[in-house]
Image (cartoon, helix red, strand yellow):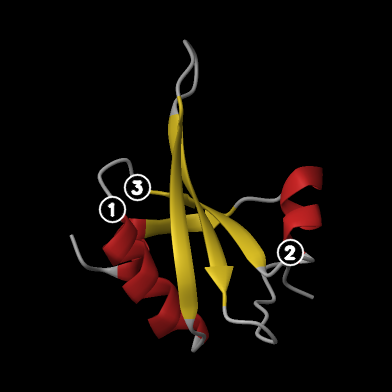
Amino acid sequence: MQSSDLIIKNPFISEKATDLAGLNKYVFEVHKDANKKQVEEVIEGIYKVDVVKVNIIRNRNRKDSFKKAIVTLKDGQTIDVVPH
């Protein structure tokens, strides 16, 4: 499961995620079996940035369970997750 299409589903857009972007942190919905190293490699490959840290969060509820990754980038680097 190394294909970027399988690991990173889409950017996770919310008010809190937008606030985190100001701290060089970006949130992505990821595949349920993805691990931190895979997420780091795929983000670095797609966006050509240096990932400092990856935190994985599982959101489990009755209707919709998903996994998201909070990716911290090196100072001065950004990702444009909202298409223009």
- Which numbered disc flags the more N-terminal residue, 3 or 2? 2
Q: Position of residue 59 (x, y in %)?
A: 49, 28
Select label 3 or label 2 by which is in front: 2
First in sequence: mark 2 or mark 1? Answer: 2
Mark 3 highlights which residue?
Answer: 31
Residue type, mark 3 in image: His
Callouts 2 and 1 close, C-beta under 8 Å: no
> Going 78% across and 56% down the picture, which residue do you hit?
18
Q: What is the tally of numbered marks visible in this picture?
A: 3
Q: Quarter of the image for the N terminus: give it.
A: bottom left
Residue 66 visible in this rendered orientation of the protein: yes
Residue 35 got which mark? 1
Q: Which residue is mark 2?
A: 21
Picture quarter with the C terminus: bottom right
Q: Position of residue 41 (x, y in %)?
A: 33, 75
Measure how far apart labels 1 and 3 are at the Cα level. 9 Å
Cα distance in 3D space between marks 3 and 2: 21 Å
| Of the pair 19 and 13, the residue shown nearer to us | 19
What amino acid is labelled 2 in the image?
A: Ala
Residue 17 in percent (x, y) is at 72, 51
Q: Is residue 61 above or below residue 81?
A: above
Identify which residue is drawn at 49% across, 14% down.
Answer: 63
- Residue drawn at 21 percent across, 67 percent down: 2
